[in-house]
Amino acid sequence: MAGEGRGGYRKPEHPAAVSGPGALSARTDGGPSDGQAVQRMPDAKYGESQAFEDIQGGAPLADAVAGLVPLGAETQRPGEPGTAGASAGPGVGPQAAGIQMSDDASDYSNMKHLIPGLELIANLPGSNASTRTFVRKLKSLA
């Protein structure tokens, strides 16, 4: 039969990672992101299934497990303490990672207007000790 095998989807042999504009455009389907089949949504309402499939095709999936170090593996940074980046323990602190540490006193003074409501909560029968301690600290710093 003439024309047999023609028509329908044809997966490109060498898809582009990113398509260019206009005349430089290239097909991007069929590439590495096609490694995982599109998932279907069971019992989808009208229009939800198509939107769900469109979202999945929007960006390629990264090979997330390729860079993970197993939990029981040897460390990849033998000279760095496990507490590096934390605000306690040996190693660099959060400032080295660009994390801004705020001054507790200024944060608490910004919460001064909340004290009456928080006192009410702290005095409820089901209130725990941590809540009462927080309110006392807030009152002392505000």
Image (spheres, rainbow, N blue to C red):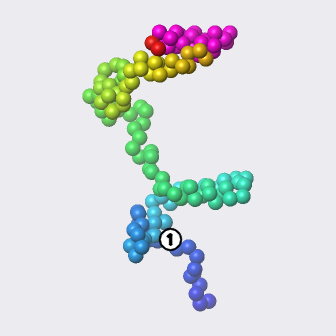
Residue occupying the far bottom of the picture = 2
Image quadrant in which the N terminus is located: bottom right
Q: Which residue sits at x=41%, y=17%? A: 105
Residue 6 magenta-highlighted: no
Which secondary structure lies at badge 1? loop
- Can residue 20 be seen in this snapshot? yes
Q: Quadrant of residue 119?
A: top right
Q: Is residue 119 magenta?
A: yes
Looking at the picture, does residue 85 appear above or below residue 140?
Answer: below
In this view, the residue in front, 123 or 47, is 123
Residue 47: % across, % down? 68, 59
The three-letter code of the residue at mark 1 reads Lys
Residue 51 sits above or below residue 118 on the image: below
Say if 20 sits above or below 93 in the image. below
| Residue identifier under label 1 | 11
Tell me, yes or no, if residue 14 can be seen here.
no
For residue 68, above or below residue 87: below
Q: Nearer the viewer, residue 76 or 59?
A: 59
How crowded pointer 1 is (Cα within 10 Å; few <14, some 14-19, many 20+) is rated as few
Extreme residue in the front direction = 113
Question: In the figure, residue 13 lies in which quadrant?
Answer: bottom left
| 99 lies left or right of 31 | left
x%, y% of residue 43? 73, 53
Count of numbered marks: 1
Residue 22, position in %: x, y? 42, 73
Image coords of residue 30 (percent x, y): 48, 65
User: Which residues are the magenta region?
Assistant: 118-140
Residue at 49% over, 66% down? 29
Secondary structure mostly taken by the magenta-highlighted segment of the chain:
helix
Q: Residue 94 lies in what quarter of the image? A: top left
Q: Residue at x 37, y 25 (%)?
A: 101
